[in-house]
Amino acid sequence: MSAVLSALAVSDRSSSPAARFTPLGRLAAAGTLVVGATFQVLAFALIPDYSKTLDRLQWVAAHPAQAQVSKTFDLLAVPFLFGGVIVYVLLGRERAPRLAWMMTGLSVCFAASRIAIPCSILLMLNAGTP
């Protein structure tokens, strides 16, 4: 157990990239990560998990307001997910720059898909409304 704790202990706090963040920057970084994750959890919690697409679409047709709220949280999470990528890049670019930039590219692709899918679902939900 002490080996795990010693691996997690920071010997020199001034060498951490977060040490150069201002207090407001630290608060903004933490808030970005927490709010993005919270919005994602809310989006997933509002809609039951179905194994078949047809069952899910039938549920969405029966509960359009709840489905709209879920997709709204899905879309609201995206800017915070992009912000989370920036936070992680700022924290990781000094010690592992190639890994940080590779993660940035993959995260941007993921976040773009997180925008496209909910937008298409919202368009389908609103297609029948005048």
Image (spheres, grey):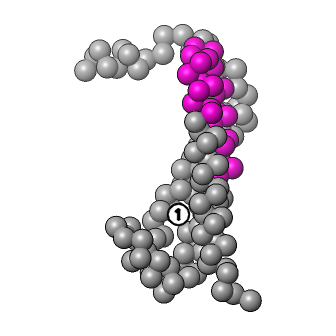
Is the N terminus in the top left, top right, bottom left or bottom right quadrant? top left
Question: Which residue, given by chain and number where applicable, does mark 1 sit on?
Answer: 43
- Report the span colored magenta: 78-105
Residue depicted at x 70% and y 26%: 21
Residue depicted at x 57% and y 14%: 95
Identify residue type, mark 1: Ala
Q: Which residue is nearer to you in this view: 25 or 112?
A: 112
In this rendering, the answer to whether 87 lies above or below 47 is: above
Callout count:
1
Q: Main secondary structure of the magenta part?
A: helix
Quadrant in the picture for residue 31:
top right
Is the C terminus in the top left, top right, bottom left or bottom right quadrant? bottom right
Question: Would you say residue 107 sits in the magenta stretch?
Answer: no
Q: Secondary structure at mark 1?
A: helix
Answer few, some or many: residues within 10 Å of disc 1's Cα (few below 14, many 20 plus, some between 14 and 19): many
In this rendering, the answer to whether 5 lies above or below 59 is: above
Residue depicted at x 73% and y 36%: 24
Relative placement, left or right, of 35 versus 10 is right
Residue depicted at x 62% and y 33%: 105
For the question of whether residue 2 can be seen, the reply is yes
Q: Position of residue 101 (x, y in %)?
A: 63, 25
Question: Would you say residue 90 sits in the magenta stretch?
Answer: yes
